[in-house]
Amino acid sequence: MGELKQGRGLGDWLNERVRLSSLVDFLRQKEVPRQKHSFWYIFGGLAFFFFSIQVLTGVLLVIYYSPRPDSAYESVRFIGSQVPFGWLIRSLHGWSANLLIGVVLIHFFSVFFLKAYRRPREMMWFSGVLLLFLMLGFAFTGFLLPWDTKAYFATKIGTEIPRTIPLIGDWMVSILRGGEYIAEESLKRLFALHVVILPLLTSALILFHLILNQVHASSIPLRIEARQPGIPFYPNYLFRDAISWLVGLTLLLSLALLWPLQLGLKADPFASAPVGIRPEWYFLTLFETLRLVPAQILGVASEVWVNLAVMVVTGGIFLVPILDRKASRQQASPIFTAIGVAACLYMVTAIALAYLTT
Amino acid sequence: MTIADAKPGELITRKGFLSKALIAWSGCLLFPLLYVIVRYIIPPTLREKVMAVMNLGKISEVPVDSARIVKFNKTPVILVRNSEGQIKAFSAVCTHLGCIVEYRSDDKNFHCNCHGSVFDVNGKNIGGPAPKPLQPYRVELKEDNIIVSKL
């Protein structure tokens, strides 16, 4: 416990009431392992940084946004053209979403390849995978909100995919859309998910994930010795975090200023899907898979197989710490490393193909 | 029966009784509340007026070798007029994942731009991942009107 200083400054006044010195002492004692792969630790904090940007810019956008089909598009256009710096806030929100998912994927793969999920950090992996899916959920639900053509068709396809799941497919589609069609109920439902339900779930999971990080500290890869002493979290590692956040913020601002977000034509449920339509890069793996798979396999529609594959892959990702018996015994597991490399190669190839052929 | 007659484990303390009562009381409130929340999330089935037969426009509004998407109740239907002047109607919803198709007069086929499905002028799926043909509609021509109904 820090000493209670009886000074006169604002810091002392706060410290007497909030005991910040206790937190600072805890952070000084906390150490981050110093080893040759320490660099990868920054991506977790960077993901948290971009998520915070999303919350801040999202709150600002919701001040002007109207979640109804007859006014959603117009409100987004109003933000972009009439609200001071509205175009910048919207661009920051859009680009930060892309960077957030990119950083989360880097964090995910770095944890995977460094086997940081092995005992006793399995719960960190489970909560982290759920957070990854929540981030994709944010991206999907937020995409409809401008109610332009691309948003409409992306949501139409995305909510149609579960229909082929036996027994519950139609019911799931109805729940996602608020009815049979993409309409006002869909917009309201996805808006509620995007600004209330998903943020609450994500905040709780982030807190859980961070608490576990305090309990277990950062993982040291197999066959690597951490050098002593470790990196004091405060102020040394926090300083590194701050640098990575500044780099992230600079990159974000550059992207938002150089390539501000555009708004397509207003959604028309009775117009054809435009030529060259495709989802954002993080959904292109699934998109390209759907395009490449033939119409029927063994007499069954391809979407059924793709749904099955997605469920198996999702379940497999979730259960990695359980399935990787060798890692749980603190041994090298080259098979899982090979699976991870194959997955990365497939993703990159699918994304490249999608960009080149649409 | 007195306390002296009770077998071990038969007696219940006031604390034990209150714990069980609180759990039961919570269950009585929470399970119905859970049902209410789940039922709330499931969208209501709205009764809407559905027309079995609709006048979807004038023949003169669909030039030869072109198509037009119109509303049949809440469903987009594509009216296509082929080179012989015949008018056919199909659901404009691709049978793959629900995108709206377009008619291209250069190859006289319907194309779905989402994942590359192709349907011929009779609605049959001839390319891409679409597993089924476009749903056809019955077309009757009365004077200059295109009367469409479900098959």
Image (cartoon, grey):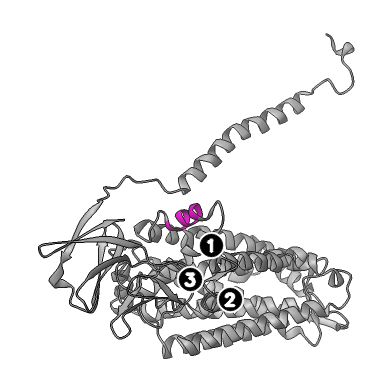
Coordinates of residue B72 in the picture (x, y in percent): 26, 59
The amino acid marked with disc number 3 is: Leu
Disc 1 from disc 2: Cα separation: 15 Å
Q: Mark 1 vs mark 3: same chain?
A: yes
State the quadrant of the C terminus of chain B.
Answer: bottom left
Coordinates of residue A40 in the picture (x, y in percent): 71, 83
Occupied quadrant, residue B60: bottom left
- Residue that appears at 66% across and 30% down: B24
Q: Mark 3 vs mark 2: same chain?
A: yes
Occupied quadrant, residue B121: bottom left
Give the numbered dot on residue A209. Answer: none
Q: Which residue is mark 2?
A: A49
Question: Relative to the observer, which residue lies in front, A338 or A227?
Answer: A338
Cβ–Cβ under 8 Å for marks 3 and 2: no
Q: Earlier in the sequence, mark 3 or mark 2?
A: 2
Question: Relative to the observer, which residue lies in front, B123 or A176?
Answer: B123
| Extreme-left residue of the structure | B143
The amino acid marked with disc number 1 is: Pro
Does residue A3 show up?
no
Q: Which chain contains the residue that carries disc 2?
A: A
Relative placement, left or right, of A238 versus A147 is right
Instruction: State yes or no: residue B130 in magenta.
Output: no
Give the numbered dot on residue A56. Answer: 3
Task: Please give the range of residues in magenta.
Answer: A170-177
Are there few (<14), some (14-19), or many (20+) residues within 10 Å of tag 1?
A: some
Disc 1 from disc 3: Cα separation: 12 Å
Give the numbered dot on residue A199. Answer: 1
